[in-house]
């Protein structure tokens, strides 16, 4: 997050270490990591206290499970908006605003809880409000990672961020449960936890205020509007297969694993006959395992592929769900949950890395927002389903159903590979020539704009050319084209015409800014197959709108004269 007022880019001179802790040598990242850890401890204390408070307010498993939905649904609804705003506006100011929003939400909830004016629906409402702030905060929070560390350290950085969150998850639930249990009234204990969480947001705000941010990517063009930014983000996802694979894996995994998070409090209270401290220890066991995984994931990645890590974690969590369903020994459950936390972090950290490394800087926050929408959508919908099944049958049936579903969908999920092959080079391409200047008296927002490129390709190179040009199709569409086509001259087959349409001339200029070194490699391959003494001819055409012919002044006068 914030820092000691640095005014330089991340230190690329720091090499990747063998232990995965190299990012902590960068003061900018280290300060952000400390602030994040403190805030996460408060968040997990609140999660435990809030869920346990709900078990005191109602006996309904559905309402208890809806606490997970209230935490996840805002991200599902607002993830795309959050990503768009983080790509448009100053991320530092956004983070300060949403941290203040969360402080206010938790502060009001703390006051209402202290005085005993809290109901199940009020608790759900304030949990929902708190997580609106979290949903809008998270894409910007994660998107600043490349501003803090060099690209080669991003996998270690993501692992350390996971370690931060899960270190908090290891101690936060136990501390939250201990505080609730330490007071005679659950309202006093829960209210105290909420107040401490509010203070943790104040600390993060202070660090952000002192951070002197220098963004890595700053467009020279006017900012996109939010609606247009969301559309361009969705368009990028639609034509980015690597990113789609990450999203599919994230949704399937979280949908079924959400049964663990949403029903753990019910298992602790009903099946194990535990109090808030017992629930906090069970929840903390997940965090302890997550910390262990996060600190060793650097070495695990060196020995196993991303697909192998995801496969092992998925199959182990099938076992975890069945153990939660049928085993009633706290010691066995704690040991099982520790390894489950390790599997959870290994999976989600691996998918997070794949998202961050598969997209360029201009769309990074939107990609992360889409990822969080997918991630929390799985958590929210899963929590509703497993809570509903538990309420109308039993927790055993609900957890067993989740285990079977995770196992049945595993062969399908394995078809979507992530982090395979060399990573694309997302360095912005430096154009050798400026963008063409419009000869007409038009506005940059005028459009649509059709760009037409003519190639001359020998017959023997036709197959290679069409293969390359269809790779370029993905680049055009990801970077903003609404439509694309390649056409072959019916009279002279050597001549081919590539045509794509942009919403406006301004969108075309933005697409030039978005070209990366990897994109240019594809474009260069296409142009290399053009064989003519002149380079491919490019024309730019703006939609010709109908203009009414003005009536000559003498005609008007004539008309007036003929009036009676």
Image (tube, rainbow, N blue to C red):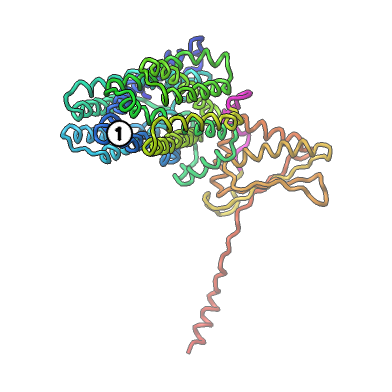
Residue 75 is at least partly visible in this image: no
Quadrant of residue 468 within the rendered picture:
top right
Quarter of the image that includes the N terminus: top left
Residue 301 is at least partly visible in this image: yes
Residue under pointer 1: 102
In the displayed structure image, the side of residue 451 where residue 462 appears, left or right: right
Quick one: 190 or 105, which is closer to the camera? 190
Q: Residue furthest bottom?
A: 564
Residue 115 among magenta residues: no
The residue shown at (29%, 27%) is 46
For label 1, the SS is helix
Q: Range of the magenta residues?
A: 418-435
Quick one: 306 or 525, which is closer to the camera? 306
Image height of 435 relative to 561, above or below: above
In the displayed structure image, the side of residue 133 where residue 320 appears, left or right: right
Q: Position of residue 384 (x, y in %)?
A: 40, 38
Residue 425 among magenta residues: yes
Q: Position of residue 432 (x, y in %)?
A: 63, 33
The residue shown at (49%, 87%) is 563
Question: How many dots with numbers?
Answer: 1
């Amino acid at each position: 997050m914030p820092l000691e007022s640095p005014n330089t880019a991340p230190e690329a001179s720091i090499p990747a270490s063998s232990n995965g802790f190299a990012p902590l040598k960068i003061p900018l990242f280290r300060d952000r990591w400390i602030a994040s850890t403190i805030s996460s401890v408060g968040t997990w204390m609140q999660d435990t206290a809030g869920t346990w408070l709900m078990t005191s307010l109602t006996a309904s498993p559905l309402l208890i499970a809806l606490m997970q939905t209230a935490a996840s649904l805002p991200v599902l609804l607002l993830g795309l908006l959050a990503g768009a705003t983080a790509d448009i506006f100053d991320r530092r100011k956004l983070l300060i605003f949403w941290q203040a929003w969360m402080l206010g939400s938790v502060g009001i909830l703390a006051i209402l809880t202290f005085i005993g004016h809290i109901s199940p629906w009020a608790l759900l409402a304030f949990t929902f409000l708190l997580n609106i702030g979290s949903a809008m905060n998270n894409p910007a929070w994660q998107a600043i990672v490349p501003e803090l560390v060099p690209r080669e350290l991003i996998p270690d950085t993501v692992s350390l961020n996971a370690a931060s969150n899960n270190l908090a998850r290891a101690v936060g639930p136990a501390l939250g449960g201990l505080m609730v249990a330490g007071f005679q009234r659950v309202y006093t204990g829960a209210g105290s936890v909420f107040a401490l969480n509010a203070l943790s947001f104040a600390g993060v705000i202070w660090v952000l205020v002192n951070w002197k941010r220098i963004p890595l990517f700053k467009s020279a063009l006017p900012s996109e509007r939010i609606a247009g930014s969301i559309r361009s983000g969705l368009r990028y996802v639609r034509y980015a297969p690597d990113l789609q694979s990450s999203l599919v894996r994230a949704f399937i995994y979280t949908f079924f694993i959400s049964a663990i998070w949403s029903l753990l409090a019910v298992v602790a209270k009903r099946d194990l006959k535990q109090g808030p401290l017992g629930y906090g220890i069970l929840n903390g066991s997940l965090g302890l395992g997550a910390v262990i995984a996060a600190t060793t994931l650097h070495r695990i990645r060196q020995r196993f592929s991303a697909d192998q890590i995801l496969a092992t974690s998925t199959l182990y969590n099938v076992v975890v769900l069945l153990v939660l369903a049928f085993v009633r020994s706290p010691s066995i459950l704690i040991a099982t949950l520790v390894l489950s936390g390790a599997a959870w972090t290994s999976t989600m950290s691996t998918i997070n890395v794949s998202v961050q490394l598969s997209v360029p800087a201009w769309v990074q926050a939107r990609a992360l927002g889409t990822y969080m929408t997918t991630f929390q959508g799985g958590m929210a919908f899963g929590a509703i389903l497993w809570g509903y099944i538990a309420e109308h049958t039993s927790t055993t049936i609900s957890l067993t159903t989740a285990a079977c579903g995770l196992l049945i969908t595993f062969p399908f999920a394995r078809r979507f590979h992530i982090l395979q092959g060399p990573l694309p080079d997302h360095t912005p391409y430096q154009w050798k020539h400026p963008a063409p200047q419009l000869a007409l008296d038009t506005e940059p927002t005028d459009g649509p704009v059709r760009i037409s490129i003519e190639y001359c390709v020998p017959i023997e190179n036709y197959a290679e050319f069409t293969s390359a040009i269809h790779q370029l199709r993905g680049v055009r569409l990801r970077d903003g084209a609404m439509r694309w086509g390649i056409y072959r001259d019916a009279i002279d087959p050597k001549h081919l015409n590539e045509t794509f349409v942009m919403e406006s001339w301004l969108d075309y200029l933005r697409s030039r800014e978005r070209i990366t070194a990897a994109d240019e490699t594809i474009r260069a391959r296409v142009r290399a197959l053009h064989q003519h003494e002149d380079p491919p001819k490019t024309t730019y055409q703006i939609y010709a709108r109908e203009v009414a012919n003005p009536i000559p002044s003498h005609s008007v006068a004539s008309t007036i004269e003929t009036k009676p």
